[in-house]
Amino acid sequence: MGAILMHSCGNRQDQLWLLAGTGEGPRLAAALIKRGWRVQVSVVTPSAARAYASLGLESLAVGALQGEAAIAAFVGERGPFRWVVDATHPFATQISADLEQVCGGLGQPLLRLERPLETGGSATVLQGIDDLSGAALQGRRLMLAIGGRHLAAAARLARVSGAEVFARTLPSAAGLRGALAADLPQGHLAVLRPLQGEPAGGIEQALCRHWAITDVLCRQSGGVTERLWRRIALEQGLQLWLLRRPPSAAQVETVPSESALLERIAHG
């Protein structure tokens, strides 16, 4: 865990620990603070932290939590909390599993925000990256917008299927490592800053036109980025491919929306 910016702790019965990014996180934090909760937030990157700069948080911790021991230490030092709220990315399965294990062992109440699956429009869902090896991509121009972790494997398999591959990635260590490992031709990679809130998508739209993209692969996140690519695919007549969302932790209480989360916290 990196830097921690702190205010006073106050009464711990009205404190929450929110783990989130830049999608729902700032809205949730603002809504919780407005309702009288003392909110501590953990984010992974300094760029994500900037989205919370104007909020009256109790603390803002920046940096990846390194496993169960780090989570237990945070709860032991700063908690217990009335609630720990897991609003991390649906593909961030390790942190969610670690939170489930630690909070369960400590008797620490935990809520998981489970983003609803997007509906409408036409999209092909891949069960995993390996499905790209059999996809109908011969002669297609494929944009990868899936983060750094699977970027190299996706690029390799898409090329095997006959696609010309392009990628959009974030300026994070993982994103840049994935981009380098993907071995993309010069001019086939765009490094963009993280999206803040509901994005307009102007840069992504321009990239698709500039590269004459025919297909896009993104993650089935249920968040702002998936909605962005669904809209662009519809507007530009692109084939949209979705990398299937991993199953959520079975033993964690989940809520399906921000409003449901706020309601559960208010009456819990």
Image: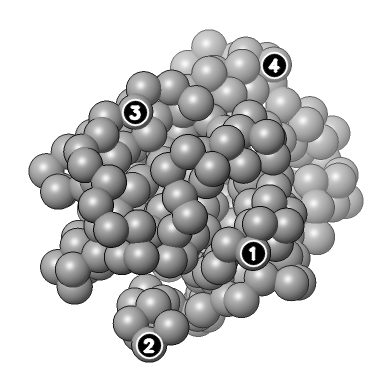
The CA distance from mark 1 to mark 2 is 19 Å
Asked if disc 2 and disc 4 are in contact, CB closer than 8 Å, the reply is: no
In this orientation, does residue 16 appear? Answer: yes
Q: Are marks 3 and 4 in contact (CB under 8 Å)?
A: no
Q: Amino acid at mark 4?
A: Ala
Q: Which residue type carries mark 3?
A: Ile
The residue indicated by pointer 3 is 4
Of 28 and 241, nearer the camera is 28
Q: Count every numbered label the image shows and give the total.
A: 4
**Residue found at x 48% / y 55%:** 80
Q: Nearer the viewer, mark 3 or mark 1?
A: 1
Number of other residues with Cα within 10 Å of mark 1, as a class: few under 14, some 14 to 19, many 20 or more: few
Q: Residue at x 70, y 62 (%)?
A: 104
Give the residue at mark 1.
Answer: 107
Q: Secondary structure at mark 2?
A: loop
Of labels 2 and 4, the one closer to you: 2
Residue to which mark 2 is pinned: 267
* Earlier residue among tags 2 and 3: 3
Which image quadrant is residue 27 in?
bottom left
Which amino acid type is marked by label 2? His
* Badge 3 density bin: few <14, some 14–19, many ≥20, Cα 10 Å: some
Q: Quadrant of the C terminus?
A: bottom left
User: In this orientation, which residue lies closer to the viewer: 214 or 193?
Assistant: 193
Q: Mark 1: which amino acid?
A: Gly
For disc 4, the neighbor class at 10 Å (few under 14, some 14 to 19, many from 20) is some
Residue 10 sits above or below residue 27 on the image: above
